[in-house]
Amino acid sequence: MKTKGMMIQQLAEHLGYADSEYLSKLLDHLLTEEEATLMTNLPDTPKNLTLKLDLDEEYVNCRLRDLFMRGLVLIDSHVAGEPIYLVDNNAGRFMDMILFDPRYQEEDEDFYSLWRDFFNNELVYAPRSPEKLPFRIIPVDENIEDHRTILPYEQVSEIIKNAKRIAVQNCPCRTREQRCSAPLETCISLNETAEYMITRNIGREIIYSEALHILKSAEEFGLVHETDNTDNPTIICNCCSCCCVFLRAITVFQQEDVIARSRFFAQFDKEKCILCFRCLARCLFKSITFVEGQILIDSSKCYGCGLCSTTCKGGAISMVLKENALSIPHKGDEFMQGFTNIP
């Protein structure tokens, strides 16, 4: 018979971090022995688990539903009307599904310290494929030189407009890191992902106009828009460089190829520049410098977020489509693809 420690080790290994002392401590804190038993026997349906573990069916259903509501398990699909529960194998998404939930704000500092240690010492170094990056930067809608060049699924206002259902929830990254005063309620989920967030009571349903207001406020605060790197976005994050997964990896850990750049770059017209220097403060990627009396933009460091262009008093910066802009992958690799099913 497996001990709780053995089951925690099995779950940590399933998430790809068998040797992580941080993740093991978190799992041990989050789960009872009975819950660990259920999770290490997934994926499966409640009925099958009832037979396999010789447990009461109502008890199994209630425990799995509770684990789902706490973000510890997901639902893969349904068979004959029964949900097939599973444990995510993506450690980053597993972390977010927990930290999206306001109930964990009641936890003490040790809880968040463990999540910070797990991310900053282990998860941030997870191998990534440059050919299959999960998220991408979206340019701010304003100051795009030719709007005919922007696609509906890389324009935040159009992404929101085309959504059938919208919800907003707290940013899991700023909840974890707690390093700045940026607003928390800024993560916008769409369609089935919105329904998942609302079902778990971690997302607040909003309408188009409020979503636009949240996005505009995020831009004014200097947050960068990010979304799934597909033509079927399911979530829009508004990210700071000190807390958020991908921007922190770039700006603090000097990592490259962690997030896809937008298909636009900042084009600078020195004749219009009045040296207001606002762009220097706005650029999170340090692609803008002031050298020998003039502003310079290093296009190799520009991620195409557009924040510099929106506060340029002289109108010297516009966003232009790159000559060899890569196409955006077709739907199928969304952040929550296949995991937004509800009981």
Image (spheres, rainbow, N blue to C red):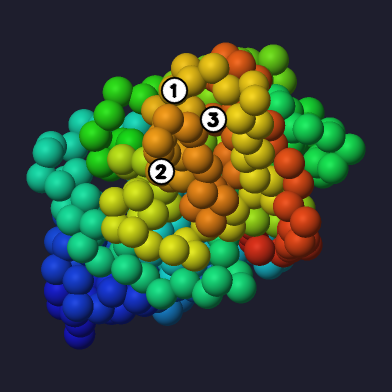
Residue drawn at x 60%, y 70% as measured from the top left = 132
Callout 3 secondary element: helix
Compute the Cα span from label 3 to label 2.
Answer: 11 Å
Residue drawn at x 39%, y 23% as measured from the top left = 183
Query: In this orientation, does residue 284 appear?
Result: no
Counting other residues with Cα less than 10 Å from the Cα at mark 1, is it few (<14), some (14-19), or many (20 or more)? some
Q: Residue furthest front?
A: 292
- Give the label on residue 11, or none: none
- Name the residue carrying label 2: 286
Instruction: Tell which circle, 1 or 3, labels the residue nearer the N-terminal end.
Output: 1
- Name the residue carrying label 3: 308
- The answer to whether mark 3 and mark 2 are in CB contact below 8 A is no
Q: Is residue 157 above or below residue 177?
A: above
Compute the Cα span from label 1 to label 2.
Answer: 13 Å
Q: Is residue 96 above or below residue 33?
A: above
Q: Quadrant of residue 317?
A: top right
Residue 243 in the image, given as x and y percentages of width and height: 32, 41
Looking at numbered disc 2 in the image, what kind of residue is underneath it?
A: Lys
Q: Quadrant of residue 206?
A: top right
Looking at numbered disc 1 in the image, what kind of residue is underneath it?
A: Phe
Residue 72 in the image, given as x and y percentages of width and height: 38, 55
Looking at numbered disc 3 in the image, what kind of residue is underneath it?
A: Cys
- The answer to whether mark 1 and mark 2 are in CB contact below 8 A is no
- Name the residue carrying label 1: 277
Q: Quadrant of the N terminus?
A: bottom left
Q: Residue furthest right?
A: 148
Callout 2 secondary element: loop
Residue 14 in the image, given as x and y percentages of width and height: 36, 76
Give the mark toward the camera: 1 or 3.
Answer: 1
Callout 1 secondary element: loop
Residue drawn at x 64%, y 21% as measured from the top left = 272
Instruction: Tell which circle, 3 or 2, labels the residue nearer the N-terminal end.
Output: 2
